[in-house]
Image (cartoon, grey):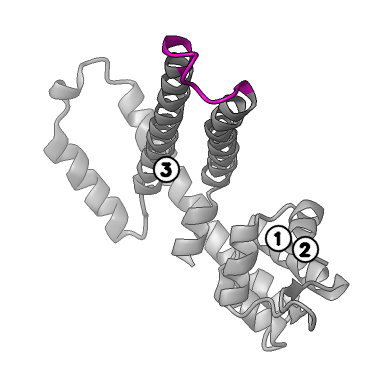
Amino acid sequence: MKINQVEQLVGITKKNIRFYEEQGLLSPGRNRENGYRDYSDEDVRKLEQIKILRKLGLPLEEIRMMQAGKSTVADSMKRHLITLEREQQNVKHSIRFCEVLKDREGLLSDLDTHELLTQMDEMERSGASFKDIKNRDVRQKRYIGAFIASAAMVILMTGLIALVIWGFKTEPEGAPPVPIVALIVALPVTVIIGVLMSLKQRIGEIKKGEVDDARKF
């Protein structure tokens, strides 16, 4: 089975499938004729297992231990539940603090930041932890970067198309035959379509947080 088929079947992108291979969670065989990866039904089953566990937020090391038989599903879930319960408590602390702030009608400049940070420090010393939105900010930058790169390429290819058409209209006698011109125009059009398709895929990857998952674990 080819990687494109596995991607469609399991709903995991090729980038993440290869990432799991690099991490040793998946070891597909090779086609003897062409050397390409040849995924089996067992590989698909492993990817489905990984997908379930990743959706629950398990780190790769925990999945690796389960695959190696060093940890049962029950033992891993017990450890992960402790982590989730801790995160749940942290969210409750943040909610409580937000409820305090929502009753303050003034502007941001009116806040007693020293008092608030002192309260936060006291809560953190008691075991609380507040949410870090750095990943969300980074994700937004990735969206912008993807759009800018795609827009630049589309503008460049559109300019090339306009230049070819302008040249054909300006000097029709010295221009190549119409089929050749059409072929020349078709090339940047194909590039534009490819760029837009890649942008759509990239947005999907960023939205799912796949890049963050790969770097985090």
Q: Amino acid at mark 3?
A: Arg
Residue for badge 1 = 51
Q: Tell me residue 109's x, y (percent).
A: 14, 23
Residue visible at 69% across and 76% down? 26
Q: Tell me residue 211's x, y (percent).
A: 49, 55
Q: CA distance from mark 2 to mark 3?
A: 26 Å
Residue 129 visible, this angle:
yes
Residue for badge 3 = 139
Q: Tell me residue 122's x, y (percent).
A: 25, 53
Q: Amino acid at mark 2?
A: Glu
Tell me, yes or no, whether the two marked residues, 2 and 1, touch with CB atoms within 8 Å.
yes
Q: Residues within 10 Å of mark 3 (few under 14, many from 20)?
A: some
In front here: 4 or 174? 174
Tell me, yes or no, whether the two marked residues, 1 and 3, touch with CB atoms within 8 Å.
no
Q: Which residues are magenta?
A: 168-178
Q: CA distance from mark 1 to mark 3?
A: 21 Å
Q: Is residue 129 left or right of residue 47?
A: left
Asked if 74 appears above or below 153 in the picture, the reply is below
Check disc 1 and report its element: helix, strand or loop: helix
User: In the image as oriented, which residue stretches furthest toward the top?
Assistant: 169
Q: Is residue 138 left or right of residue 184?
A: left
User: In the image as oriented, which residue stretches furthest toward the front?
Assistant: 173
Residue visible at 55% across and 53% down? 210
Q: Amino acid at mark 1?
A: Lys
Of marks 2 and 3, which one's residue comes earlier in the chain? Answer: 2
Q: Is residue 14 left or right of residue 128?
A: right
Q: Residues within 10 Å of mark 1 (few under 14, many from 20)?
A: some
Residue 48, which numbered label?
A: 2
Asked if 50 appears above or below 74 in the picture, the reply is above
| Quadrant in the rendering for residue 129 | bottom left
Of marks 1 and 3, which one's residue comes earlier in the chain? Answer: 1
